[in-house]
Amino acid sequence: MKEVSFENFASLDIRVGTVLSCEPFEKARQPAFKLWIDFGDEIGERKSSAQITDLYESASLVGTQVLAVVNFPKKQIADFMSEALVLGVYSNDGVVLLRPDAQCVNGAKVG
Amino acid sequence: MNELKLWWKKRWVRNVLFLAILAMLFFTDAGKWIRVQVTGITLSAPSDSSQSMDTSSSVYDFPFEIQDRAGNRYLLNHFKGKPLFVNFWASWCVPCLAEFGSLEALQERVPEMEFLFITQESEEAFQAYLSRTGHQFNFYRQRSRLPTHMAHDAIPASFVLNSKGVIVFSHIGAANWNDQNLAEELKAKIH
């Protein structure tokens, strides 16, 4: 396993955000959701495409908090700009979302 | 090979027409409308699944926020004192749209009940649907976490709340709500 420095880790800007809206991403090749996420005052609202449909199909994600990397380059997927990478764990049943253990302020940093 | 060519020559109009109809069904608004109508015909009356829900406490204990088409935000307990019919839907969900007609009829059968239609899709998709639908419902966007009472793993999902906010009837999935017996059952349960 490759070792990295703390600086490597710290260069990732991982933030808490609250899901504002959620729709299926019909034009994506892999089943995915379009998410609109509020990352607080500094970062604001960002869009994200997330392949989390296995365990969250039609589940109510609005109002729940997620963790996402917000300093990757933006990525165009079909007609949608993904501006954050939502984090999850690859379980046997599909992707499980990572969430803070208690309610946090939107934009709070992971470190 | 020759036979295939001959077959195509004889039938190409029919084949092209068939493909065009298929494409229309799956990729256009008109096709979606037809799918909604066809799904609507196949629906049957809802069955109550509220026994498996949390009916020991009021949904109003939980701050649940929704937003109307004009941007006004309400907590669900704003409607306290009135029986409520809460429907979770989305404009991309064909079964959801398919049951709207019968819900309109139920609204007429049980006028004392307030009907709320809540989606979690984006403002853009929400407004786009509202601008083209003929249904005169009270449509809302979900703005906060769902109360655990109304947890659902599929839409449409419908919950009937009495005036205190306790769930008295629920059904997950699309149904034909236009039924006099059902209307009587709901009336008895909300009073």
Image: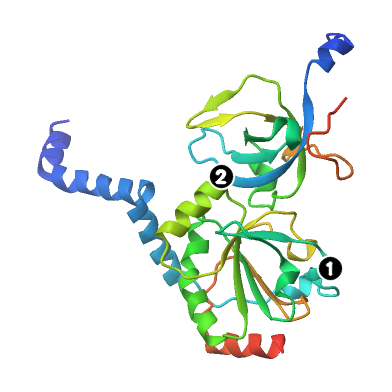
Query: Does the rendering let one see residue A60?
Result: yes
- The answer to whether residue A92 shows anywhere in this view is no
Q: Are marks 2 and 1 on the same chain?
A: no
Q: Where's residue B52, x and y in %?
A: 77, 70
Q: Is residue A27 left or right of residue B110?
A: left
Percent across and percent down for residue B58 are 82, 73
In this rendering, the answer to whether B182 lies above or below A26 is: below
Quarter occupied by the N terminus of chain B: top left
Chain letter for the residue marked with disc 2 in the picture:
A
- The residue at which mark 2 appears reads as A24
Residue B159, located in which quarter of the rendered image?
Answer: bottom right
Instruction: Evaluate if marks 2 and 1 touch, with contact meaning CB atoms under 8 Å apart.
Output: no
Q: CA distance from mark 2 to mark 1?
A: 31 Å
Q: Residue sitting at 85 percent across and 11 percent down? A: A7
Q: The numbered mark 1 sits on a residue in which chain?
A: B
Q: Is residue A104 left or right of residue A23?
A: right
Q: Nearer the viewer, residue B164 or B39?
A: B164
* Disc marking residue B61: 1
User: Can you say whether B32 is above or below A40 in the image?
Assistant: below
Three-letter code, disc 1: Asp
Mark 2 or 1: in front is 1
